[in-house]
Amino acid sequence: MISQAIVDKAELFIQEHFKDEKTGHDWYHIERVYKMAMELQSIEGGNKGIIQLAALFHDFTDSKLKVNPDEAELQMKDCLYQYGVLEEDVKRIIDVIDCVSFSKGKKVPLNIEMQIVQDADRLDAIGAIGIARCLTYGAAMQRPIYNPNHKEGTTIQHFHDKLLQIKDKIQTSAAKKIAIRRHKVLESYLKELENECNIQF
């Protein structure tokens, strides 16, 4: 069993590790994902400790943030072992984290822990906070915001390539209700953006 004391240690470590992150994958993103995962777990069930630690570490091995994801995974394992997490639980945590990625798009049936952490992370990519994070990441990658003549590689194109697809990829019933509302925020924003960029009143 994963104790709250273990989770508390992990939280302090992750908070310190991500304190200077500037691409929208900062501690506050992780905290929101953690809180959302806990809310979904209270409704949908699943192993609370596994969900807690997977939510906290879900970006730790992300290739967008780490030059060497494999090395980061070894560091994560070492941390978890030092905290007293059993080997079988470490494996389960890693399996959950591996299913979070949008780009990997794993088709295997997901267990409830995987569904919850994946949904919590994806919910933070849409709605008002999702818009803010997308623009922040685009700026960090030096992408143009909008180009009506060449949409590829722009931040706004990322909405169409990824964010607008998220609503239909949500797994749990509780998260689907939230996703519908946040998806409408994306649609409203993009419609207004098009109007403003094309000077429509």
Image (cartoon, rainbow, N blue to C red):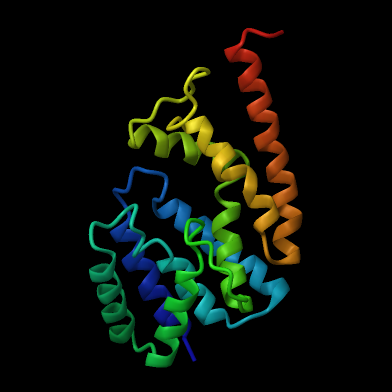
Res 141 → quadrant: top left
Quarter of the figure with the C terminus:
top right
Looking at the image, which is closer to me, 157 or 132?
157
Q: Position of residue 50 (x, y in %)?
A: 51, 80
Q: How many marks?
A: 0
Placement of 110 over or under 139, stated as above or below: below
The image quadrant that residue 173 belongs to is bottom right
Rendering coords of residue 24 (x, y %): 42, 45
Is 20 placed left or right of 169 in the picture?
Answer: left
Question: Does residue 163 appear to the left or right of 18 in the view shown?
Answer: right
Q: Residue at x 27, y 68 (%)?
A: 72
Residue at image point 43% right, 65% down:
58
In front here: 1 or 111?
111
Apparent side of residue 143 relative to residue 195 in the rendered image (left or right): left
Relative horizontal placement of residue 126, taking residue 17 as reference (left or right): right
Q: Nearer the viewer, residue 39 or 70?
A: 70
Q: Residue at x 49, y 26 (%)?
A: 151
Measured from the top left, where is residue 125 in percent x and y? 55, 48
